[in-house]
Amino acid sequence: MIQLNNTEKVCVNQEEFGLTISLKKTNVNAQRTETTPNIAINGYTLEVVENFTYLGSTISSSLSIDLEIKSRVAKAATVMAKANQHVWNNSRLTEKIRLRV
């Protein structure tokens, strides 16, 4: 019997359910390792990345939340800039409406 690693097992199991893995969109993020992993699926070597975004959160290989915090602050600043442009600086809105916002 051929010994399969965990990545190969996932590939075999997903095919049984009619699912496909997009190898071009699949990345590897190794956390707390000194060596860079070399993971291949069907001869295709997956790209190793330092950071990636998953469900809106930034995941870092260093397990630091600094990048996540910077990302959230930047998103909040963008929203506030849009609010400033569309609400606070809008002369057609009354002060009462602005206070409600």
Image (cartoon, grey):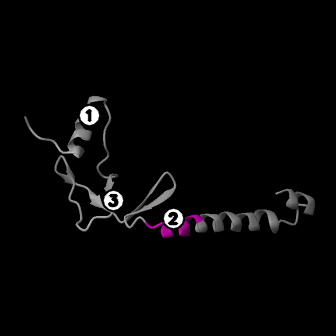
Crowding at dot 1, Cα within 10 Å, few <14 / some 14-19 / many 20+, comes out as few
Check the image and name the residue furthest to the front: 32
Judge whether residue 30 is colored magenta: no
Check the image and name the residue furthest to the left: 1
Please tell me how many numbered marks the rendered image carries.
3
Which residue was labeled with disc 1?
13
Q: Give the residue at x 44% y 67%.
A: 64
Residue type, label 1: Asn
2 or 3: tag closer to the N-terminus: 3
Quadrant containing the N terminus in the rendered view: top left
Residue type, label 3: Asn
Closer to the camera in the image, 57 or 88: 57
Quarter of the image where one finds residue 19: top left
Q: Position of residue 75 (x, y in %)?
A: 60, 64
Q: Position of residue 101 (x, y in %)?
A: 82, 57
Label 1, label 3: how far apart the Cα atoms are: 22 Å
Q: Main secondary structure of the magenta part?
A: helix
Helix or strand or loop: what does disc 2 sit on? Answer: helix
Quarter of the image where one finds residue 17: top left
| Side of 32 where 5 appears, left or right | left
1 or 2: tag closer to the N-terminus: 1
Helix or strand or loop: what does disc 3 sit on? Answer: loop
Above or below residue 42? Residue 57 is below
Which residue was labeled with disc 2?
68
Q: Position of residue 24 (x, y in %)?
A: 31, 52
Q: Give the residue at x 15% y 42%.
A: 4
Q: Start and end of the magenta stretch?
A: 64-72
Disc number for residue 29: 3
| Side of 66 where 91 appears, left or right | right
Residue type, label 2: Glu
